[in-house]
Image (cartoon, grey):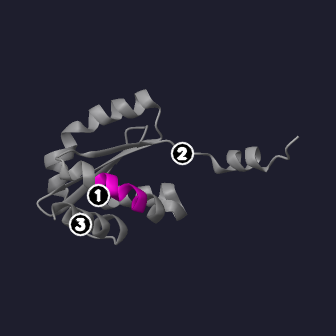
Amino acid sequence: MMSKKIESLLRKALLEDGEMAHSLYEYELEEHIDYWYDGLKADRDDFVFVVTENSGHVAMVLIMPDKTVLVNEAARAKLAEFWQNNYSLNLNRLIPTMVDELANDSLFVNGVKTVDHKLLKRVWGKARS
């Protein structure tokens, strides 16, 4: 039952532009920014985002390589900008894992590497020899 509630809250917050709680960001996420930033640098990720749920509230943070920190709605908007047409598809794939992590009292932490689409088209667009 708890998993279904968490899933519903995540879908509303991440896919339906629902409200997120800044106080939850401050309570559960803010103190870990440096740790996640160090992980982002060590893993050479393009960004890392973290999602949490507590008492029916959702919060998220997105951290970029220049240490820009975006919270909640701003983080969601930046993630949508990064993923463009794949935003909903990617989140629909990730939400079950988010639910599992959050239902087990863990935070969902995800480092992301992006692909340069122009480079990808050049590589895949070449004729095979």
Crowding at mark 3 (Cα within 10 Å: few <14, some 14-19, many 20+): many
Q: For the residues marked 2 and 1, what is the alpha-carbon distance in whole angstroms?
A: 21 Å
Amino acid type for the residue under numbered disc 3: Leu
Question: Percent position (x, y) of residue 70?
Answer: 33, 51
* Of the two numbered discs 3 and 1 in the rendering, the one whose residue sits closer to the viewer: 3
Give the structural element (helix, strand or loop) at label 2: loop
**Seen in the image, is 81 located left or right of residue 94?**
right
Which is more toward the observer, 52 or 103?
103
In magenta stretch: residue 116: no
What is the distance, in whole Å, between disc 2 and disc 3 at their CAs?
27 Å
- Outermost residue toward the top? 42
Q: Dividing the image into 4 quarters, which one contains the N terminus?
A: bottom left
Cβ atoms at labels 3 and 1 below 8 Å apart: no
- Seen in the picture, residue 42 relative to 51 is either above or below; the reply is above
* Residue depth check, mark 2 versus mark 3: number of the one nearer the observer: 3
Which residue appears at 82% of the width and 46% of the height?
126
Residue that numbered label 1 is attached to = 72
Query: Which numbered disc flags the more N-terminal residue, 2 or 1?
Result: 1
**For residue 9, which numbered disc appears in the image?**
3
Q: Position of residue 73 (x, y in %)?
A: 32, 62
Three-letter amino acid code at disc 1?
A: Asn
Q: Secondary structure at mark 3?
A: helix
Please tell me how crowded label 1 is: few (under 14), some (14-19), or many (20+) other residues with Cα within 10 Å: many
Q: Which residues are magenta?
A: 91-98
Across and down, in percent, residue 20 comes to 23, 63
Identify the residue under disc 2. Answer: 114
Kindly report the secondary structure that dominates the magenta region of the rendered protein: helix
Q: Where residue 69 sits in the image (x, y, percent)? A: 33, 46
What is the crowding at mark 2: few (fewer than 14 residues within 10 Å), some, or many (at least 20)? few
What amino acid is at disc 2?
A: Thr
